[in-house]
Image (spheres, grey):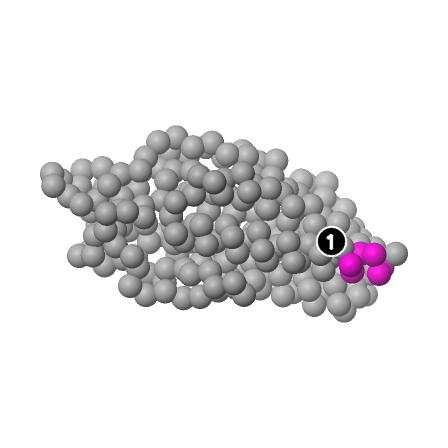
Amino acid sequence: MKKYAIVAALFVLATVGSWIVIGTVGVTVPASAPPPARAAQSGAPTAEEVMFVTMMIDHHQQAVRMGEILASAPDVPHRVGNLAEKMQVAQAGEIGDSQKWLAAWAAAAETTGGAHGGHGSSATANSGPATMTMKGMIGPEGFAELEAATGVEAAKVFLRLMVEHHEGAIETAGEITGSLSNPWVVSFAQHLVTEQSIEIASMRRMAESLG
């Protein structure tokens, strides 16, 4: 498990004017930072929400790496290789979307003058320390096992590790869901739980078929 601790000072701006949709359940992601002139009264993410998105970038990067390792292994069953490739592409896309969202709010804070936004500003700070444990992270021994495996064995190791990885992400999302308020983070967490629950069921069926 990996533990993070950051202090975030974030400021409210307007709903993003340009959005893109990812995934299969309509997750909305800001394509750019909100225009400075469109300040809003609510919606700024909390330090905990920023922590959650930041951790999920790291978590997704592990999944992408696992997909890369499996792709380099010889004689992997095609159906497992295809699933791993689709998951790799999806999670790489979500990493980019999450980084854009974090950058948008960082730009928002800078545009409003950060902690010195001025008297009478409509920006509102949501700041404070946040500590959270990211569950399901794969350790060096797991990656070593996957790198050493080939063929059907590589597929089995990948599926076992990825199920564990997904379950950790779902558990972490479940722990924070009740305290979420930012619309994007709420949507992202819901998408993560839905999508990865489906993938877990699919991976378990594949693992059973491999014996």
Question: Residue 106 in the image: x percent, y percent?
Answer: 31, 48
Q: Residues within 10 Å of mark 1 (few under 14, many from 20)?
A: many
In the rendered image, which quarter is residue 79 located in? bottom right
Depth check: give the residue in front, 67 or 97. Answer: 97
**Most distant residue in the right direction:** 211
> Residue at the spot x=32%, y=35% of the render?
127
Q: Image quadrant for the N terminus?
A: top right
Q: SS of the residue at dot 1?
A: helix
Residue 150 showing in the rendered view? no
**Most distant residue in the left direction:** 119
User: Main SS of the magenta segment?
Assistant: helix
In the rendered image, which quarter is residue 151 located in? bottom right
- From the viewer's perspective, tell me whether residue 175 is left or right of residue 97: right
> Residue at the spot x=41%, y=60% of the render?
29
> Residue at the spot x=58%, y=55% of the render?
194
Depth check: give the residue in front, 126 or 8. Answer: 126
Question: Residue 95 in the image: x percent, y percent?
Answer: 49, 55
- From the viewer's perspective, tell me whether residue 133 is left or right of residue 157: left
Q: Is 143 colored magenta in this rendering?
A: no
Relative vertical location of residue 164 with respect to residue 202 in this rendering, above or below: above
> Residue at the spot x=57%, y=36% of the render?
2
What residue does disc 1 label? 158
The magenta stretch is 205-210
- From the viewer's perspective, tell me whether residue 72 is left or right of residue 120: right
Q: Amino acid at mark 1?
A: Phe
Question: Residue 159 in the image: x percent, y percent?
Answer: 74, 54
Depth check: give the residue in front, 189 or 89. Answer: 189
Circle count: 1
Q: Image quadrant for the C terminus?
A: bottom right
